[in-house]
Image (spheres, grey):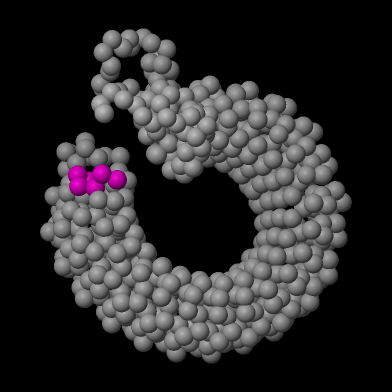
Amino acid sequence: MRGHDRINNCLPEELILEIFRRLESKPNRDACSLVCKRWLSLERFSRTTLRIGASFSPDDFISLLSRRFLHITSIHVDERLSVSLPSLSPSPKRKRGRDSSSPSSSKRKKLIGNKHSGAENVESCSLTDAGLTALADGFPKVENLSLIWCPNVSSVGLRSLAEKCISLKSLDLQGCYVGDQGLAAVGKFCKQLEELNLRFCEGLTDVGVIDLVVGCAKSLKSIGVAASAKITDLSLEAVGSHCKLLEVLYLDSEYIHDKGLIAVAEGCNRLKNLKLQCVGVTDKAFAAVGDLCTSLERLALYSFQNFTDKGMRAIGKGSKKLKDLTLSDCYFVSCKGLEAIAHGCKELERVEINGCHNIGTRGIEAIGQSCPRLKELALLYCQRIGNSALQEIGKGCKSLEILHLVDCSGIGDNAMCSIAKGCRNLKKLHIRRCYEIGNKGIIAIGKHCKSLTELSLRFCDKVGNKALIAIGKGCSLQQLNVSGCNQISDAGISAIARGCPQLTHLDISVLQNIGDMPLSELGEGCPMLKDLVLSHCHHITDTGLNHLVQKCKLLETCHMVYCPGITSAGVATVVSSCPHIKKVLIEKWKVTERTTRRAGSVISYLCMDL
């Protein structure tokens, strides 16, 4: 009945707060806060996380937020992002009697003024020490703090933060030019710190890192360091001596050598996750890791010049609990090394081989024969791996759910048929530029892999309509990418439209034989569609686009550059018919002034001069 508020009259505040906490989408939370004053007040107490980009003046913005949200425990400031704040901009329509000189109006004017000055001075859109001090004053209970690429934050601000936010558990300083004094202050005051990311912190030296490690020794569990020329083995020796609870270590540095990593292996026997890109580390260090880090579960190695099968054998012999292995550009590792891992680490669930040119068929066969728990396999740029490798995977890895194949010229239809028959729990299949895979292999996938929800077949020249017809009959896809598969035409996409009603993402770019008919079918059969890529489709016109958007009201992104049949009318149709649209990628000359006025914020341009 009009005038009666049954929800507010019946529901207690505790229950409404619990409902708000279960809302994962920020727009939904924002919408709830606008319902009434009670909901606005309650929504303030339910928020625990804030994300701030390089918009307006972050220093002033933090001061305002601290007065509104009182229970924040996680704050993420990322100055690579530009976050629009429409709620702070002046509205063209004001409530009757609203005084333009009200306090809230003056706040908006102040922020807008800062925004305009920021256009002239980039520093006004950067968090400074003053803002970090305001953050510490306003959010003293913060536990997780990320300051990503905040160049104007220094040790002064970091010290003021450390003194007041003593409950800090996670600190990410990626790209911040803080010095040793600030890091030492964190070690002195933040005794509960568990996670620390120092990637691209060029102002730090061993002195600051050692001070922090000594101060947070009893709590520190995760450390990340990258591109810091003055952080050397001395820091790792301190980590090994003091951080007995360390579980995660990420290192990307040419200044780290065997001595530092051996010290960590000797002192941190709880280490579970090790990710390294250190050209100075050799097999000697990995011998220590294999012998001493018996709890190791994840190992990722990138661009190693001095890591060979000897190091792999040490890992296989000692790290029996290894579940996740990534080898990228490790040119001196061969099939023998991978066989040692397979025979020793039978709990492997994920394996990624990227650009390791000496690893061939025999290494992957060993994985299939010895690792029955494998759930994800990624083979990227592996020219020496043939069909029999995946045939063994199909026989031995019945739990496989995710398979990535990129530029594997030796893998063809026979391998895919084996995967289809043996790995019936497959959920995601991503293939790119594997020119020997055609209809036969994909038809087998459609016939046997009923749980498949994501399929990507980018630039697979031998895949055609028959493959997609089989997929449409056998699988309920949510995501499909067939970019560059030139044998696919209207019949294949129409089959997907009829057979996959849950489809949310579709990429049919660079398909020269696609016209308007499948777009009409997609409109009828795929009402859940959110992301659509049509770029370089020369036979799609405004007519097909119009049929699609009449039914696909949930569409959020649409890429349609280099489509000569799509005109300014088609662009206007998309932005006017799709209430949830967030991004339209199109040539600038196809956007009228009226469309720009109506939806300029969602239009993105490619090739501005066309």
Q: Who's the residue at 54% across and 37% down the image?
A: 49
Res 248 quadrant in image: bottom right
Quadrant containing the N terminus is top left
Q: Who's the residue at 37% across and 79% down the image?
A: 446
Number of numbered discs on residues: 0
Rendered position, 515 above or below 383: above
Res 393 quadrant in image: bottom right
Instruction: Read off the magenta span.
Output: 575-580
Q: Is 495 contained in the magenta span?
A: no
Rendered position, 564 above or below 291: above
Q: Is residue 327 visible?
A: no
Q: Is 579 contained in the magenta span?
A: yes
31 lies left or right of 121? left
Q: Position of residue 278 (x, y in %)?
A: 70, 61
Q: Who's the residue at 26% across and 13% down the image?
A: 96
Q: Is residue 300 visible?
A: yes
Rendered position, 583 above or below 56: below
Q: Position of residue 330 (x, y in %)?
A: 64, 72
Q: Who's the residue at 65% across and 65% down the image?
A: 300
Q: Nearer the viewer, residue 173 or 572?
A: 572
Q: Position of residue 93 (x, y in %)?
A: 25, 21
Q: Position of residue 550 (x, y in %)?
A: 18, 53
386 lies left or right of 106? right
